[in-house]
Image (cartoon, helix red, strand yellow):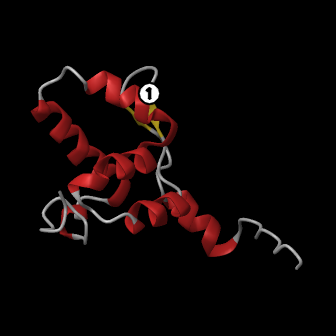
């Protein structure tokens, strides 16, 4: 089967990309978290939002930074972690992310 050629960024696609602030979330000088790709987002959303899956979802969300992030927050009060998770959810999904399925106000999230 022939491989589909990747589209050249132009037209509205280029405009959409220009509208997105693709700067990473700078947590520390060493930990810079890029926006999730569409593939990462699909994988993240495919994992049920249950307490048992929290670690898997964070691993997808934070990618190669996950281990460093875990280490950074290990001895911090959980309230600091909770604020970070809220901030990251808004960074990845926007200010109304808590209203979306799997958002922190969704009864299925854990």
State the image coordinates of residue 83 (x, y, percent, origin top left). Answer: 17, 39
Residue at the extreme right: 2
Residue at mark 1: 31
In the rendered image, which quarter contains the C terminus? Answer: bottom left
Answer with left or right where residue 79 lies relative to residue 5: left
State the image coordinates of residue 38 (x, y, percent, origin top left). Answer: 52, 63
Q: In the image, what residue occupies the spot 25% across and 66% down?
A: 102
Q: In the image, what residue occupies the spot 46% across and 32% down?
A: 32
67 vs 85, nearest the viewer: 67
49 vs 84, nearest the viewer: 49
101 vs 8, nearest the viewer: 101
State the image coordinates of residue 77 (x, y, percent, origin top left). Answer: 12, 26
Quarter of image, res 100: bottom left
State the image coordinates of residue 39 (x, y, percent, origin top left). Answer: 55, 62
Residue at the extreme bottom: 1
In the rendered image, which quarter contains the N terminus? Answer: bottom right
Q: Secondary structure at mark 1?
A: loop
Q: Is residue 26 above or below residue 60?
A: above
Q: Is residue 64 above or below residue 14?
A: above
Answer with left or right where residue 21 lies relative to residue 3: left
């Amino acid at each position: 089967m022939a491989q589909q050629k990747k589209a050249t960024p132009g037209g509205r696609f280029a405009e959409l990309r220009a509208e997105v602030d693709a700067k990473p979330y700078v947590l520390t000088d060493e930990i810079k978290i890029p926006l999730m790709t569409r593939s990462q987002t699909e994988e993240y959303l495919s994992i049920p939002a249950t307490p048992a899956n929290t670690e898997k979802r964070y691993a997808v969300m934070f990618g190669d930074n996950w281990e460093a992030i875990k280490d950074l927050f290990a001895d911090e009060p959980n309230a600091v972690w909770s604020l970070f998770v809220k901030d990251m959810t808004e960074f990845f999904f926007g200010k109304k992310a808590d209203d979306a399925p799997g958002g922190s106000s969704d009864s299925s999230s854990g």
